[in-house]
Image (cartoon, rainbow, N blue to C red):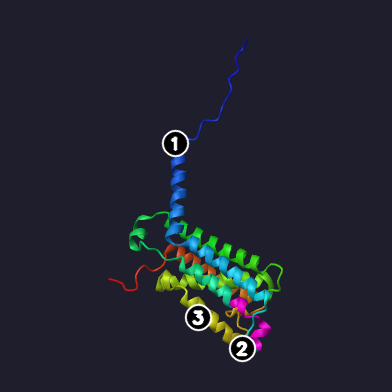
Amino acid sequence: MTAVKVLKPPPASAGTTRRVLAGIRLTWLHLRTRRVPAGILALAACGGVLRAALYWHWTFAGLYARQQQIPLIIEAGAAAVIAVTAHSPFGETEQATGRWLPYLRLFAAVGMCGLAIALLQLGAAGESLNEGVLVLARNIIGITGIGLLCSLVTGGLLAWTLPMGYMAFCQYALFQAWTAPWTWPVRRPADRGAWICACAVFAAGLLLFTIVGPRTRLSDDS
């Protein structure tokens, strides 16, 4: 009687398992130190506020009522939340020792941006959102890019200032009926120039944020 040998795949090495677990733990610690879980709750709250605004027709008077600028304020708020999660409590020590840090920054920023779009769209589901999900997505990615660029100068804790300032500027641009592509929140969904500007700002902010990281102190020693 011939014995047939059954070939079994070799078990995963203990070293590989440890590396995977260490990678998961590192990612979780990175997200916790940036208060990403609290940021996700804030984004969910933005989605809830957007739902209430659309359901009860919250509006300003005059021109703003026709253009529904409340959604723009909420979208800018969501982008500001993402920018604030760039803050690191460990500062220069983390930058000097973490070789995976750029990848974690990229993962966190892109993931939060996608989650913000999903949660706000979920909040607007079944309601009449001005210009639809395309403008919502364009506003979030563009204003998030502004926030990431701001974090390079001010640090994560103050990275919300420029996104909110840009939002206020866009309110004025709408009142003045400006058509420049760099005022993309007030442009139509199919406006190619507006999409190019928003995506370019997001790409620049994400690239520099990933490589350089947010500023860790407001004054340099050099």
Q: Tell me the quadrant of the picture where the C terminus can be found.
A: bottom left
Task: Estimate the x, y position of residue 53 in percent, counting from the top left.
Answer: 64, 76
Mark 1 highlights which residue?
14
Magenta part of the chain:
62-72
Specify whether residue 203 is painted magenta: no
Residue type at mark 3 is: Gly
The numbered mark, 2 or 1, whose residue comes first in the sequence reads 1
The amino acid pointed to by label 1 is Ala
* In front of the other: 77 or 49: 49
Name the residue that disc number 3 marks.
Answer: 165
Mark 3, Cα crowd under 10 Å, few <14 / some 14-19 / many 20+, is few
Residue at the image position 65 percent from the left and 65 percent from the top = 122
Structural distance between the alpha carbons of marks 2 and 1: 63 Å
In the displayed structure, 106 sits above or below 146; it is above
On screen, residue 35 above or below 1: below
> Which badge, 3 or 1, is on the more N-terminal residue?
1
The residue pinned by badge 2 equals 175
Give neighbour class at mark 2: few <14, some 14-19, many 20+ (Cα, 10 Å).
Answer: some
